């Protein structure tokens, strides 16, 4: 069983990297992009027999994301 | 005879200011600190703990986060609860933030630059055990070297730490103007250093240990360390 955890910045947290990517798109002459949000994901494989969701939640909250500045979302693959 | 007090420096894989800190403490306080490796799960006794700058665990995931899972950090938290003074410098500040001893977050510099320069700091709170020998609003000059020093905190929490006098240093001009022009990284209200509520834990982005010799870019770090004399 694989859980995918998505992590991205909360609204209002400046992400200079996303801003740079957005600016680069404009520099490529492409005009349609109004906003761009960057994030990351982690695929975490666990055994099949037990419900591991609470552990994945703990990993997400205590390690993968900083709840002060980031959101996370867990999706079962 | 009084027992000699013990200063501890915690080292993580990727710390790189630990020896500078050792030299600074030895020179300014006349005491040899002990090094604690990050996987030490029991610190028998200590009278002060310092967490040095660097790039612990390669800044993987978020600066400081991986280090917070090292056994030595559980000990740092244990001693902090006993009131032992704890100081985090640069990556040490990031670690103290990520482990929850200090509030807020340190995110990427808003200007997308690794900032390596000398900055002026204004002493905002001179009533802590770490800063009581400074004058209020005294200006000191120290080097910074970081890409993730942009201090962020939500407005309601900011008000709380302001009301509780937890803001210790702010980036300023030579004359103490705290304005955007003198903010090197986008930090909320030019914040460069804060303390916990009890004021026994302090974190700052600038490097006092890099300003203690005549060949350094300034010697204002000497006073920072000499201020600790009363604590040991």
Image (cartoon, coloured by chain):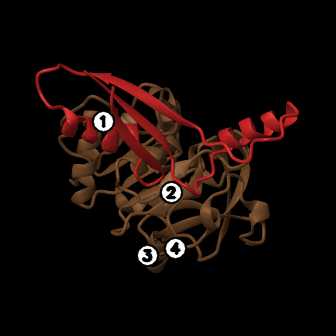
| Callouts 4 and 3 on one subunit | yes
Chain ID at mark 2: B
Q: Gap between marks 1 and 4, in whole Å?
A: 32 Å
Q: Could you tell me which residue is drawn at 67 percent across and 38 percent down?
A: A17
Q: Gap between marks 4 and 2, in whole Å?
A: 14 Å
Q: Mark 4 highlights which residue?
A: B126
Q: Secondary structure at mark 3?
A: helix
Observer-nearest residue: B172 or B230?
Answer: B172
Q: Colour of chain B?
A: brown
Q: Mark 3 highlights which residue?
A: B160
Q: Secondary structure at mark 2?
A: helix
Judge depth for marks 4 and 3 and give the one in front: 3
In what quadrant of the picture does the C terminus of chain B appear?
A: bottom left
Judge depth for marks 1 and 4 and give the one in front: 1
B60 lies left or right of A38: left
Residue B111 in sight from this viewpoint: yes
**Is disc 3 surrounded by few (<14), some (14 to 19) or many (20+) residues within 10 Å?**
few
Observer-nearest residue: A39 or B78?
Answer: A39
Q: Mark 1 highlights which residue?
A: B69
Q: Gap between marks 3 and 2, in whole Å?
A: 30 Å
């Amino acid at each position: 069983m694989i859980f995918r955890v998505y992590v991205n910045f909360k609204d209002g947290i400046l992400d200079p990297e996303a801003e740079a990517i957005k600016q680069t798109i404009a520099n490529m002459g492409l005009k349609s992009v109004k906003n761009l949000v960057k994030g990351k994901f982690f695929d975490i494989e666990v055994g099949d027999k037990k419900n591991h969701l609470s552990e994945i939640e703990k990993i997400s909250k205590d390690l993968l994301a900083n709840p002060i500045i980031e959101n996370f979302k867990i999706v079962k693959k | 005879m009084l027992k000699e007090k013990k200063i501890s420096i915690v080292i993580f894989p990727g710390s790189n200011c630990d020896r500078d800190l050792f030299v600074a403490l030895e020179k300014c306080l006349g005491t040899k600190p002990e090094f604690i490796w990050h996987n030490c799960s029991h610190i028998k006794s200590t009278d002060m703990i310092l967490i040095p700058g660097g790039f612990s665990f390669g800044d993987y995931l978020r600066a400081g986060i991986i280090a917070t899972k090292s056994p030595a950090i559980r000990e740092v938290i244990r001693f902090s609860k006993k009131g032992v003074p704890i100081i985090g410098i640069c990556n040490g500040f990031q670690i103290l933030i990520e482990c929850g001893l200090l509030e807020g977050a340190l995110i990427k510099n808003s200007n997308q630059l690794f900032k390596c320069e000398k900055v002026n700091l204004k002493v905002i709170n001179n009533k802590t055990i770490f800063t009581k020998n400074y004058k209020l609003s005294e200006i000191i000059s120290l080097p910074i070297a970081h890409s993730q020093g942009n201090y962020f905190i939500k407005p309601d929490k900011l008000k709380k730490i302001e009301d509780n006098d937890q803001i210790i240093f702010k980036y300023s001009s030579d004359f103490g103007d705290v304005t955007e022009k003198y903010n090197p990284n986008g930090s909320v209200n030019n914040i460069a250093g804060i303390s916990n509520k009890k004021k026994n834990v302090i974190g700052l982005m600038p490097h006092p240990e890099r300003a203690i010799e005549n060949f350094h870019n300034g010697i204002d770090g000497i006073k920072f360390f000499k201020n600790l004399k009363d604590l040991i």
